[in-house]
Image (cartoon, grey):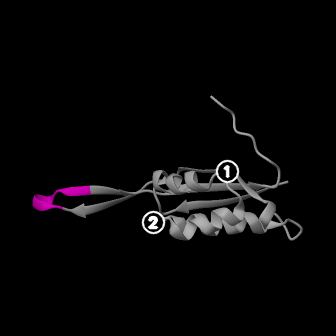
């Protein structure tokens, strides 16, 4: 059985979120929850909330100790563009990046493809 949780329009860069996801991908859920407080990234809070949601989506009958993080990824979200005034009437455009996060937990053994 699989359970999926999404987090859309999160105010983090997808590359920074993927660094955290790479550490918990393939681990058991209790092991992932044990690792998350020690990861020195701000986006770990978002990953932890989404992982809790995925475990809750598995239902009451599912044992969290038997669940594994089968898949986890983050993709680009829309870029929020802002303008800062500069000298002589110029402007500097800076981008606030967002991402879409998906975590899939499963109770079955997952195999990774080699190569």
Tell me, yes or no, whether the highlighted magenta stretch contains residue 88: yes
Pick the quarter of the image with the N terminus: bottom right
Q: Mark 2 points at which residue?
A: 40
| Residue under the point 57% across and 66% down | 36
Q: Callout 2: 10 Å neighbours few (<14), some, many (20+)?
A: few
**Quarter-wise, where is residue 85 in the image?**
bottom left
Range shown magenta: 86-92
| Residue under the point 56% across and 54% down | 23
Point out residue 69 in the picture as x, y percentages from the top left corner.
70, 55
User: Of residues 30 and 90, which is closer to you in this image?
Assistant: 30
Q: Vertical placement of 82 versus 70: above or below?
A: below
| Residue under the point 80% across and 47% down | 109
Point out residue 97 in the picture as x, y percentages from the top left corner.
43, 56
Pick the quarter of the image with the C terminus: top right
Circles 1 and 2, Cβ within 8 Å, touching? The answer is no
Instruction: Assign a secondary structure to mark 1.
Output: loop
User: Of residues 87 and 111, which is closer to you in this image?
Assistant: 111
Toward the top, the furthest residue is 115
Instruction: Assign a secondary structure to mark 2.
Output: loop
Q: Name the residue under label 1.
A: 26
**Quarter-wise, where is residue 105 in the image?**
bottom right
Point out residue 103 in the picture as x, y percentages from the top left corner.
67, 56
Q: Vertical placement of 96 versus 60: above or below?
A: above
Q: Answer left or right for 31 relative to 107.
A: left
Separation (CA) of disc 1 from disc 2 = 20 Å
Toward the left, the furthest residue is 88
């Amino acid at each position: 059985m699989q359970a999926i949780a999404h987090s859309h329009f999160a105010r983090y860069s997808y590359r920074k979120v993927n660094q955290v996801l790479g550490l918990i991908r393939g681990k058991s859920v209790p092991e992932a929850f044990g690792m998350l407080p020690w990861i020195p990234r701000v986006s770990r809070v978002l990953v932890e909330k989404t992982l809790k949601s995925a475990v809750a989506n598995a239902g009451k009958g599912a044992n969290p100790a038997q669940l594994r993080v089968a898949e986890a990824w983050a993709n680009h979200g829309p870029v929020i563009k802002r303008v800062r005034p500069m000298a002589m009437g110029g402007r500097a455009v800076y981008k606030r990046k967002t991402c879409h996060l998906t975590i899939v937990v499963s109770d079955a053994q997952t195999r990774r493809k080699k190569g």
